[in-house]
Image (tube, rainbow, N blue to C red):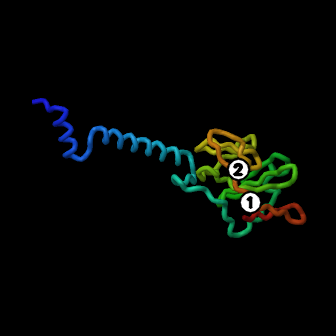
Amino acid sequence: MIASEHDCHTCAVARGVSRREFVSQATLAAVAAVLAGCGSAGSDTALGPGVLPKPPVISTPMIVTLANFPALATVGGVARVSSQPAIALARTASGLVGYSLECTHAGTTVELRSDFTLRCPNHGAEFAFDGTWTGGQQQTSSLFSVTVTPDASGETVTVTT
């Protein structure tokens, strides 16, 4: 015996889920899975949905010996000087600047490329050597700045937040 459309609907309602509701819920679950994958692929610090990155916290001032980072000797040079938190220094025409390497879009640690530019591996945001946002696949803001204070000799700098 073949069930009529009415019988099928009655049966589905008795079970609590219609065909339309099932397809709708399955689609939402698939979209959620894809979005969850976008937030963590290739990252080492991706934050959850709706969680915005915060400026870095440096609880104890970092002393950086500039001779250990030859790239900082020339304008346009950049070097990662700390991993926890991930901090970079860059030499600009006016001196040294420092910033967090945590992407301001979702908290992923950005990659330092061979041309001294930075790129978020998760979202494609791109940054100049001094941490300013320059474009890419995701619009975001510039990287969070840290305070860089050179000593009198110019051989070391103190990095704080």
Residue at 66% x, 39% y is: 136
Identify residue type, mark 1: Val
Q: In the visual, does 31 lie left or right of 110?
A: left
Residue sitting nearer the eye, 72 or 59? 59
Judging from the image, what secondary structure is the residue with disc 2 in? Answer: loop
- Residue that protrudes farthest toward the front in the picture: 6
Q: Position of residue 71 (x, y in %)?
A: 80, 49
Q: In the visual, does 136 lie left or right of 148?
A: left
Q: In the visual, does 143 lie left or right of 107?
A: right
Identify residue type, mark 2: Ser
Q: Position of residue 58 (x, y in %)?
A: 69, 65
For label 2, the residue is 142
CA gap between label 1 and label 2 equals 12 Å
For label 1, the residue is 146
- Residue that protrudes farthest toward the bottom in the picture: 60
Q: Quadrant of the C terminus?
A: bottom right
How crowded is the residue under tag 1: few (<14 C-alpha within 10 Å), some, or many (20+)? many
Residue sitting nearer the eye, 74 or 46? 46
How crowded is the residue under tag 2: few (<14 C-alpha within 10 Å), some, or many (20+)? many
Nearer the observer, disc 1 or disc 2? 2
Q: Quadrant of the N terminus?
A: top left
Residue sitting nearer the eye, 124 or 16? 16
Q: Position of residue 2 (x, y in %)?
A: 13, 30
Is 69 drawn above or below residue 160 in the view shown? above
Residue at 70% x, 46% y is: 112
Q: Please count the marks in the image.
A: 2
